Image (spheres, rainbow, N blue to C red):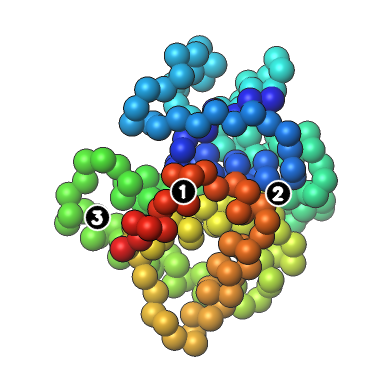
Amino acid sequence: MIFYSEEKGHYSHMVRIVLAEKDIACEIKEFDPNGKLPPELATINPYNKLPVLVDREVTIYEPRIISEYLDERFPHPPLLPIYPNEKAECRLLIHRIERDWLPIMDKMMAPKITQREFDKLKKELVSLVAGIVLVLKEKPYFMSDEFTLVDCYMSAILYRLPYLGVSTPKSKSFDSLYNYQDKLFARPGFELSLTDSERDLKYSFN
């Protein structure tokens, strides 16, 4: 099994968290998307972008599809609920993250963006973060008693907020967010998922 990954891309990081949480033996090939991409990428992914997972004769792209494939291929520990209604709710949460959160982050991390547009997007991201504070008070993880694929997504997103200059008030009302972050970042799988480039992000946090 080979995983073609961006060195510090949030989409690749989400999958690396899944790999680490499940302790999956996998060769991870890291690439800088602004540098030289693997020459075989265009032949294994018609969109010619990372991340991509190759498992013997199977080639999979798109982070959610890769993550769900890994969860089914290596069922322990499960990262999606067993019951159909709970599994659907989990997938809907991921869908909302993909629709609401990730496009903002993609634009903010784009190489060519004006300061005015960046500041506008940052306000939108702060609003999204503030909107989950109450939700995080209800369960140990994101609307779940167990760590799920939703938390894999949120781990990669929340880790990058300081780098993007997104800060939240240091007030008691945000304690649920800080407790959630601490819980995610303290997991052994999260530490194992980080590349050297991602560890360096903390030194460039604004």
- What residue sits right under mark 3 in the picture? 118
- What residue sits right under mark 2 in the picture? 21
- What residue sits right under mark 1 in the picture? 198
| 170 relative to 191 in the view: left or right | left
- Of pointers 2 and 3, the one earlier in the residue sequence: 2
Instruction: Give me the residue at 44% from left, 44% from top.
Output: 197
> What amino acid is labelled 1 in the image?
Glu
Instruction: Give me the residue at 38% from left, 50% from top.
Output: 105
- Of pointers 1 and 3, the one earlier in the residue sequence: 3
Answer whether labels 1 and 3 touch (C-beta < 8 Å). no
Figure quadrant of the N terminus = top right
Cα–Cα span, label 1 and label 3:
21 Å
Answer whether labels 2 and 3 touch (C-beta < 8 Å). no
Give x and y (percent) for residue 6: 47, 35
Q: Nearer the viewer, mark 1 or mark 3?
A: 1
Cα–Cα span, label 2 and label 3:
33 Å
**Res. 111 image quadrant:** top left
> What amino acid is labelled 2 in the image?
Glu
Give x and y (percent) for residue 184: 61, 62
Which element type, helix, strand or loop, lies under badge 3? Answer: helix
- Regarding residue 61, the answer to whether it shows in the image is no
| 43 relative to 203 in the view: left or right | right
Which element type, helix, strand or loop, lies under badge 1? Answer: helix
- Of pointers 1 and 2, the one earlier in the residue sequence: 2
> What amino acid is labelled 3 in the image?
Phe
Cα–Cα span, label 1 and label 2:
17 Å
Give x and y (percent) for residue 69: 70, 34
Pointer 1: residues within 10 angstroms few (<14), some, or many (20+)? some
Which element type, helix, strand or loop, lies under badge 2? Answer: helix
Q: Is residue 110 above or below residue 172?
A: above
**Res. 190 image quadrant:** bottom right
